[in-house]
Image (cartoon, rainbow, N blue to C red):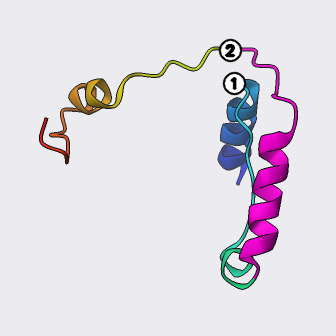
Amino acid sequence: MRREKEREWHLQEWGIRVVRYTWQVALAKPDALANRCATMMQAEPLPASRTVQTWPRLVGYQMLGITPPFGR
């Protein structure tokens, strides 16, 4: 549990929002979950103290040594 909280803290430090929910909510109350996600997306962005490095999809597959499912 502690490692999970630490990962979440790092994600938020990078400006990434985390929405917590349970399978029960996802299955029984999908509208409530959609509203929660929409609220988070409409909120002011979190200030990022770090930059998140991203790569184009194909480069990411190459870095992992995986053949892309789309065959390119």
Q: Residue at x 19, y 41 (%)?
A: 68
Q: Name which quarter of the figure residue 24 lies in.
A: bottom right
Q: Which residue is mark 1?
A: 14
Q: Residue at x 76, y 79 (%)?
A: 29
Q: Quadrant of the N terminus?
A: bottom right
The percent position of residue 36, horizontal first and vertical second, equals: 82, 58
Q: Quadrant of the C terminus?
A: top left
Determine whether the residue tagged by mark 2 lies in a helix, strand or loop: loop
Judge by depth and name the residue closer to the eye, 4 or 19: 19
Task: Tell me, yes or no, whether the highlighted magenta stretch contains residue 42.
Answer: yes
Q: Are marks 2 and 1 in contact (CB under 8 Å)?
A: yes
Judge by depth and name the residue closer to the eye, 30 or 60: 30
| Horizontal side, residue 42 vs residue 69: left or right | right
Q: Which residue is mark 2?
A: 50
Numbered-mark total? 2
The percent position of residue 56, horizontal first and vertical second, equals: 36, 24
In the rendered view, tell whether residue 18 sits above or below residue 56.
below
Judge by depth and name the residue closer to the eye, 27 or 23: 27
In the rendered view, tell whether residue 21 sits above or below residue 38.
below
Q: Which residues are magenta?
A: 29-50
- Circle nearer the N terminus (2, 1): 1
Q: Residue at x 68, y 74 (%)?
A: 26
In the rendered view, tell whether residue 65 sits above or below residue 24.
above
In the rendered view, tell whether residue 60 sits above or below residue 68.
above
